[in-house]
């Protein structure tokens, strides 16, 4: 357990701190809370659903990696399954600020990479910026999901983004987190590239058709993958490398443990992630080898 999570536990209501600590200290803790565990926390705390989610925000924010701003933001995303996923903002010293991942993006991509098909609600420390509101408007559940802030009534995403622009304005039916599975084969590929292709097959890229994925291997042999999350407004799109880095962050691992990377994308796409992937990895460690395939 990192020291910031230990500190955050001290701010958790005493009547749930012990049970929550048991969840977090478990060997299989993966920065999520099951629906059953959340219901038990509700019983122990006596809090309302939204109050408990807000009370858990310090735990989410403790995952933040923000060496530039030192401004730690947490998010809690509830998937359609009822499971809660922690997310936090992520910054990379030496990279341009466009490589930053916001807490809302992190929580949603965490849920997505673990198989969720939509978001019921998201709880966050601070009001979502316009960038994040637009990012969330790409989701399968953009028309129904709610946003919860501390000391505020819950509001729908559409209340935060009135007269919104989204996929429908570009005659696109596909949505982020939807059933948009590609079917590119991993046969004959080295294991890390195969994981990147698996992520490519999950990716959402209806505007440039550059379905793409990244896989990162750490010193301990663990592999974390990320799929590209494209957006109708283009700029809020989340590159596959950043999605993979989020998975490392919420796993409590360090970026300096990355020993190799792989990027898979389509040769027919209108853009490429190769240059940005290489340059962003360079600020982490210029010696990280990158395997690449354009299908």
Image (cartoon, rainbow, N blue to C red):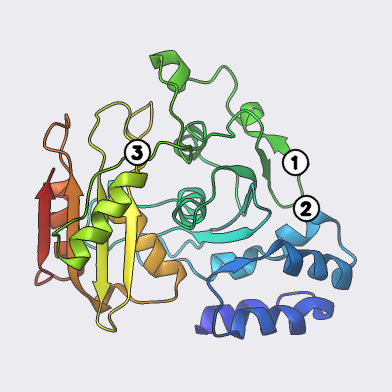
Q: Is residue 287 left or right of residue 58?
A: left
**Secondary element at tag 2:** helix
Using a 10 Å C-alpha cutoff, classify the residue at mark 2 as few (fewer than 14 neighbours), some (14 to 19) or many (20 or more): some
Residue at far front of view: 187
Q: Residue at x 24, y 82 (%)?
A: 219
Give the residue at mark 2.
50
Please state if 100 lies on the left or on the right of 252 as rendered.
left
- The residue beneath circle 3 is 237
Give the mark, 1 or 3, whose residue is nearer the N terminus: 1
Gap between marks 1 and 3, in whole Å?
26 Å
Where does the image place residue 209, in percent across and percent down from the top left?
A: 25, 30
Whether pointer 2 and pointer 3 mark residues with C-beta atoms closer than 8 Å, the reply is no
Please name the residue shown 22% across and 36% down the image. 210
The vertical placement of 270 against 280, above or below, is: above
Q: Quadrant of residue 9?
A: bottom right
First in sequence: mark 2 vs mark 3: 2
Label 3 element class:
loop
Q: Quadrant of residue 226?
A: bottom left
The location of residue 208, given as percent across then percent down, is 24, 28
Which residue does the numbered mark 1 point to in the structure image?
154
Q: Say if 115 sits above or below 206 in the image.
A: below
């Amino acid at each position: 357990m990192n020291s910031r999570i230990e500190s955050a536990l001290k701010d958790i209501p005493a009547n749930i701190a012990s049970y929550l600590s048991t969840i977090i200290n478990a060997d299989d803790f993966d920065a999520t809370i099951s629906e059953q565990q959340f219901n038990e926390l509700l019983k122990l705390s006596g809090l309302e659903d939204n109050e408990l989610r807000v009370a858990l925000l310090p735990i989410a924010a403790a995952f933040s990696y923000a060496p530039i701003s030192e401004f730690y933001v947490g998010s809690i995303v509830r998937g359609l399954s009822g499971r809660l996923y922690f997310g936090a903002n992520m910054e990379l010293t030496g990279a341009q600020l466009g490589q930053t991942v916001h807490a809302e993006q992190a929580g949603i991509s965490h849920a997505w990479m673990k198989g969720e098909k939509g978001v019921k609600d998201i709880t966050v420390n601070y009001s979502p910026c316009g960038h994040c509101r637009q990012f969330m408007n790409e989701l399968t559940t953009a028309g129904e999901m709610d946003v919860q802030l501390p000391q505020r009534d819950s509001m729908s995403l559409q209340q935060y983004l009135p007269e919104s622009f989204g996929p429908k304005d570009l005659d696109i039916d596909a949505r982020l987190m939807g059933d948009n599975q590609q079917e590119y084969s991993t046969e004959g590929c080295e294991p890390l590239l195969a994981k990147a292709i698996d992520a490519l097959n999950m990716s959402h890229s209806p505007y440039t058709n550059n379905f793409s994925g990244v896989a990162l291997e750490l010193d301990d042999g663990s592999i974390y993958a990320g799929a590209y999350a494209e957006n109708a407004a283009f700029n809020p799109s989340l590159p596959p490398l950043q999605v993979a880095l989020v998975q490392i962050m919420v796993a409590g691992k360090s970026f300096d443990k990355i020993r190799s990377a792989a990027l898979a994308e389509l040769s027919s796409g209108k853009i490429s992630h190769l240059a940005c992937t290489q340059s962003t990895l360079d600020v982490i460690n210029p010696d990280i080898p990158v395997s690449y395939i354009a299908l």
